[in-house]
Image: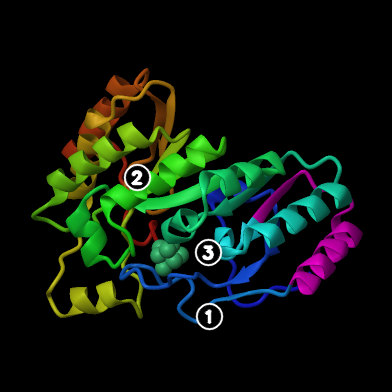
Amino acid sequence: MRYEGNIFRPPNERRSYLLQVTIGCSHNACTFCGMYKDKRFRIRPLSEIMEDIAMAKQTYGTVRRVFLCDGDAIAVPTADLLEILHRLKKTFPQIEKISTYAGPKSTLSKSVEDLRSLHENGLTTAYLGVESGDDQVLRETCKGVDAAQMLEAGQRLKNAGMNLFAMVLIGLAGEERSMENAVATAEMINRMHPDRLAALTLMPVPGTKMYRDIEQGKFRVLNATECLTETRELIRHIKLENLYFASDHASNYVPVKGILNKDKAKIIELLDHGIAGNVFRRSQWQRGL
Ligand code: SF4
């Protein structure tokens, strides 16, 4: 198999065949993200992608799950994405799930009809990096959309029938607006209705603007207690039923997960123990990703 540069995928895509349809991220400007800094964004030629699918057939035989890399495969023109989906389904008849990261700007460049057509032709799951529901945080981190646009992107993916996995980033607002950020993010999630929500915790990445801001004293990274308190506030304000919530990524200080709102009290209790220091909290080196 052939890949260009570092490849990233969500933790629960560890069993998926990774098909690189773009190189890098079409936005590539978020101040906290270093994932694709070494790549100039481009869409791979269809002929190369089809060759890769044939190689995967030879290498793996049967494939049931596919994750489309890199950071924003939804940026591929709809007609080309449909061809890729058709080829995947023809090559791997047992396929059950095809997923992708969905950049908010690229998602908004497609109509609900385009997205629905992608879903009906096999694109089952979209991972949306919401990060925050707060306009100021989205602006300061150069996410490329404001809160209303981020909500619209999530709602379009949901209305298209996709399984929507939203990801938010604890600590992104820094110290002063931590609680406001938690409430605004919960309110956006309440309106977006994702199927799953993951709360990761900010990890400064060398080479990013945020890292330089931290070095220059312009931004302070929240400590473990503050991050857990922000997570608690986020959970407290989520009103959805049957939302799978996970904050058990390697970046999180205390791993918690469950179904909201059914498990809300239990999760908050565990976070309270984490805030009080009564349960194991990952140390900084254990959070090294
Ligand atoms: S949109 Fe996602 S992958 Fe692209 S720069 Fe922002 S966080 Fe990174």
Element carrying mark 2: helix
Q: Main secondary structure of the magenta part?
A: helix
x and y percent of residue 58 in the render?
A: 91, 61
**Relative depth, front residue between 81 and 21:** 81
**In this orientation, does residue 218 appear?**
yes
Residue type (three-letter) at the residue carrying disc 1: Lys
Within the magenta stretch, is there residue 65? yes
Residue in view at x 43 percent, y 72 percent: 28
Asked if 183 appears above or below 287 in the picture, the reply is above
Compared to 239, does 281 lie above or below?
below
Q: CA distance from mark 3 to mark 2?
A: 19 Å
CB under 8 Å between discs 3 and 2: no
- Residue with the mark numbered 1: 39
Which amino acid type is shown beneath numbered disc 3? Gly
Q: Is residue 222 visible?
A: no
Query: To which residue does mark 2 refer?
Result: 151
- Secondary structure of the residue carrying numbered label 3: loop
Q: Which residues are magenta?
A: 46-67
Q: Residue at x 86, y 42 (%)?
A: 93
